[in-house]
Amino acid sequence: MRDAIQWLRSLFFIMQMYLMMAVLAVFFTPLAMVNRDYAFSAIHTYCRWVRWTAGWMIGLRTEIRGAPPTDEVIIASKHQSFLDIIMITSAVPRPKFIMKKQLKWAPILGYYAQRIGCVAVDRGKRGTAIKQMMADVKTGAALPGQLIIFPQGTRVAAGEAKPYKIGTGVLYRETGQPCVPASTNVGVFWKRHGIMRHPGLAVVEFHPQIEPGLKLALFMKQLEDVIETGSNALMKEAGLEVKHDGISDHN
């Protein structure tokens, strides 16, 4: 019975979440067409709404730990579900993402993604996209802000292992920008698929930045060590014990 009630609460939460996306789009889109700052205002308003309603509708509280970066950096984050995107975006002033090209055509999301300077990437053509981004940064065409990238390239379920892709290291090396690693445990409560949302405390933690200048291999090792160690600790705090072989147990 308890699970059934939580499932229904989760369903209503999801419904209102997407309804509010449409409501805010109607209000903010004309303003965002005139001034890009309103696009960021819309996104921040929406993300904070989702975090607030998650707390009282489904019992899922959210917490940001560490210092969210405010200058031009790369944020390399563990990605477990839509919630970590919501939380990171709510915490930094000028978020922008490297995203799948197909999302450009998504209603509402696609427009705002382009308005805030997200970079659309073809699957299988990431190298070309990274080269174009490098050119944009060097010519000043890229909008300033915090570039958010997921080093594993996709959502990874809590407790599962997936290799880190070299693209984050190439961006770090070629832009000469610091990289801020971010860990999370959101996948324990908000799965990649399905309706059920579980109560608890979802955390995104920003770690101290990795300064420019490291060799590529050393950077990638340090990045993975920091993100995985931090995420495993957060998942353990949430009741998911992650073993070294990638197999996990629920406490």
Image (tube, rainbow, N blue to C red):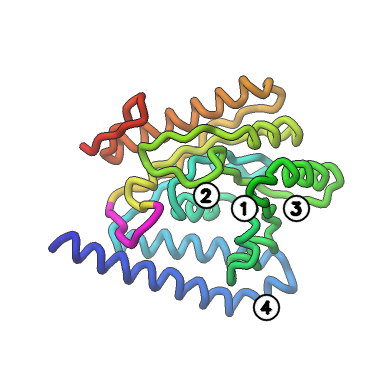
Q: Is residue 198 magenta?
A: yes
| Magenta highlight range | 192-199
- Classify residue 13 as left or right of residue 113: left
Amino acid type shown at disc 2:
Ile
Q: Count neighbours of disc 1 (C-alpha within 10 A) and say few if under 14, some if 14 to 19, many if 20 or more.
A: many
- Whole-number angstrom distance, CA of label 4 to CA of label 3: 20 Å
Q: Is residue 94 left or right of residue 80?
A: right
Q: Which residue is mark 1?
A: 99
Q: Does 30 sit above or below residue 6?
A: below
Residue 132 is left or right of residue 218, and the answer is right
- Disc 1/disc 3 C-alpha distance (Å): 15 Å
Mark 4–mark 1 Cα distance, whole angstroms, equals 24 Å
Per the image, the residue denoted by label 2 is 88
- Name the residue nearer the viewer: 180 or 196: 196
User: Quick one: SS at disc 2?
Assistant: helix
Q: Residues within 10 Å of mark 2 (few under 14, many from 20)?
A: many
Residue at mark 3? 143
Circle 4 — which element? Answer: helix
State whether the magenta stretch is mostly helix, strand or loop. Answer: loop
Labels 1 & 2 near each other (Cβ < 8 A): no
Percent across and percent down for residue 59 are 28, 58
Q: Which mark is residue 245?
A: none
Amino acid type at circle 1 is Met
- The amino acid type of the residue labelled 4 equals Pro
**Labels 3 and 2 touching (C-beta < 8 A):** no
